[in-house]
Amino acid sequence: MNKYIFVSGGVCSSLGKGVAASSLGALLEGRGLNVRMVKCDPYINVDAGTMSPYQHGEVYVTDDGAETDLDLGNYARFTRGPLSRANSITTGQVYREVINKEREGRFLGRCVQVIPHITDEIKSRITAVAREDPDNDVVIVEIGGTVGDIESIPFLEAARQMIHESGRINAISVHLTLIPEVAGGELKTKPTQHSVKAMQEMGIQPDILICRAPAMLNEATRRKIALFCNVESDAVFTSYNIDTTIYEIPLVFFNQKLDQVILKKMGVESRHADLDPWYSMMERFKAQSGTVRIGIVGKYMDLHDSYKSVYEALFHAGLDCRVKVELVKVDSTPLEETGNPADILGPGGHNVDGILVPGGFGQRGINGMVKAAAWARTNKVPYFGICLGMQIMVIDWGRNVLGWEDSDSTEFNQDTRCPVISLMEEQQGLTNYGATMRLGRSESVVEEGTKLFAAYGTKRISERHRHRYEFSNVYRKEMADTGLKLAGFTPDGALVECVEWPDHPWGLGVQFHPEFKSKPIAAHPLFRDFVAAAKDAKKTRETC
Ligand code: GLN
């Protein structure tokens, strides 16, 4: 029998439910269990692919090319279990499936309703994840939103039914709430009590409470919460504010024995806990000294979540390089209009040690990114281009090395005479924008003797894509003949996947998204080498 843990949230959003669910996953994996993570998103979008990064944050991409909510990125950073399309369930998907079945006449004339048809579809999607792998022990299901929201009711009802049908030993509820501090420093438990009442109204009695609080809750407060929320006295945990890193949270929970209590409740024999990778990650964190400043030159700068995986991957690289990475978010739009990159990025401005141009869509800010790339190239400042950031390198090479003023991507200028980046044939004429890009995992072959090869140490790599446009093969020869290094290709040689600047400490762009595969306990080699190059560049500058 598979086990299920439903993680819900109360009081308000942004309490770190994704991180709490992921940390729980990490702890159970540390106990040798096979864990799968599932996110239920109450929105009606079929997937996150069509949502603006300004409003909703980054779109996370899985190996099988699903465009999902950024919480899957948290799961990928904290846990090992595979993630695919099946691990992200949205109201849009569920309704689409049920309506398709209804149109096919599969409900045999019955009235199609939220209960049981929508809830059954949710349940069957959750159990499908458990069944996918015969060795699966536990599925952790995070229910998006806050209890009380209209949208999440069908998901909570599906959870209630699954707890009822599986029995409490096989399915439990973990509820995350907030313990606010009011003037005078007093901690208030009432919102938590109300939130648990809201869960009880949905028919779910939480088994475990995780309370977000400014500091560790004392025994008396925990006992009071247990009494009024009807949970056992050992079932109240604190997710207190920490000034280290979110990656310490698995250890914060472990020290409070969260995993032991859950295993006991679910009747799983306690196994030896191996959290060594997390302890050694924290040692690397504490061993960091000094900082490097990385300028992220992009267009979705106001919302931190827009480039979430990129920022996290830089942090992971800082752990490996024993240096703190300071993020300097530079909006490329002012740079495009009047700004001089030397003033904005150089010693008189942000004084960055490296520049990263991340992925993006649409024309605004592009010329600012090209200026930043040209500045990094000519001033030997380490540069890392991801997806759009690689395309920017190619546009710059055309404009500023080959002297083609018109060098551009057809995404930004359809009439350019030098379309160095252009649409793949299969993308031409598409009018449906949902899930129609080059998406998901594909392999690349790496040229030996390149920085790309130095990073991976292998000729064959696998990374994830999410883009429509490609390096145009028409310009391959002229670009390569003038020194731009073509460092990686698709296995059939048809597409360029990576370019590098010659005579430069570290200037590299990749058409794929390495940030999706970086973990705190295993930094991605490209991010690691980029941050190492930035650290070296800073040292060289300081000793000059
Ligand atoms: N807009 C570019 C393309 O579609 C780059 C996409 C990205 O950076 N993810 O090819």
Image (cartoon, helix red, strand yellow):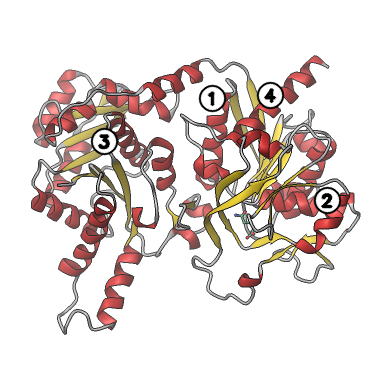
| Front residue of 266 and 69 | 266
Horizontal and vertical percent position of residue 68:
43, 55
* Label 2 vs 4, first from the N-terminus: 2
Vertical side of 206 occupied by 285: above or below: above
Q: Is residue 182 visible?
A: no
Horizontal and vertical percent position of residue 365:
71, 53
Marks 3 & 4, CB-CB < 8 Å contact:
no
Residue neighbourhood size for the residue with mark 4, other residues' Cα within 10 Å, grouped as few (<14), some (14–19), many (≥20):
many
Q: Nearer the viewer, mark 1 or mark 2?
A: 2
Q: As shown in the figure, which amino acid type bears the numbered disc 4?
A: Lys
Residue neighbourhood size for the residue with mark 1, other residues' Cα within 10 Å, grouped as few (<14), some (14–19), many (≥20):
many
Residue in view at x 40 percent, y 24 percent: 278
Residue indicated by mark 1 = 319
Marks 2/4: CA distance?
A: 29 Å
* Label 1 vs 4, first from the N-terminus: 1
Marks 2/3: CA distance?
A: 50 Å
Task: Please identify the quarter of the rendering in which residue 276 is found.
Answer: top left
Residue in view at x 13 percent, y 26 percent: 224
* Label 3 vs 4, first from the N-terminus: 3
Mark 4 CB near ligand 1 (8 Å cut): no
Residue indicated by mark 2 = 480
Vertical side of 236 occupied by 70: above or below: below
Q: As shown in the figure, which amino acid type bears the numbered disc 2?
A: Ala
| Left or right side of 481 for 500 | left
Marks 1/4: CA distance?
A: 13 Å
Residue indicated by mark 3 = 33
* Label 1 vs 3, first from the N-terminus: 3
* Label 1 vs 2, first from the N-terminus: 1
Vertical side of 428 occupied by 312: above or below: above
Residue in view at x 27 percent, y 77 percent: 101
| Left or right side of 224 for 49 | right
Residue indicated by mark 4 = 535
